[in-house]
Image: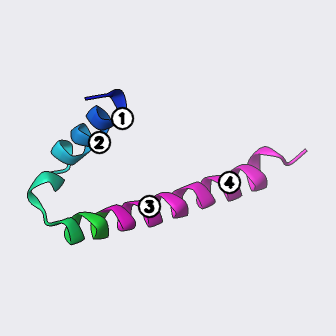
Amino acid sequence: MNWIQRKIHLYNVTFGLFMLDWWERCTFNILVIVLMCFVVRYIAQFIKRYVFLW
């Protein structure tokens, strides 16, 4: 088991995804990706608005 497979396994065990079906796991992962996109977009707007004022 290489490093990436261990991280994927740790992710599945930490969030309890190992006991879900493949389609439920995909749905959860898509929701996580969408949430992370919103967070990154918010952080980028915050940095653009408040950090680069000068």
**Which sits earlier in the primary sequence, circle 4 or circle 3?**
3
Is residue 10 placed above or below 34 in the rendered structure?
A: above
Residue placed under numbered mark 2 in the picture? 8
Looking at the rendered structure, the kind of residue marked 3 is: Ile
Residue placed under numbered mark 1 in the picture? 4
Left or right: where 54 falls relative to 39: right
* Magenta-colored span: 29-54
Q: Which mark is residue 33?
A: 3
The foreground one among 36 and 21 is: 21
Q: In which quarter of the image is the N terminus?
A: top left
**Which sits earlier in the primary sequence, circle 2 or circle 4?**
2
**Which sits earlier in the primary sequence, circle 1 or circle 4?**
1
Residue placed under numbered mark 4 in the picture? 44
Mark 4, mark 3: which one is toward the viewer? 3
**Which sits earlier in the primary sequence, circle 2 or circle 3?**
2
Q: Characterize the magenta stretch by its predominant secondary structure.
A: helix
Crowd class of label 1 (few under 14; some 14 to 19; many from 20; radius 10 Å): few
**Rendering coords of residue 28 (x, y %):** 28, 65
Q: Is mark 2 on a helix, strand or loop?
A: helix
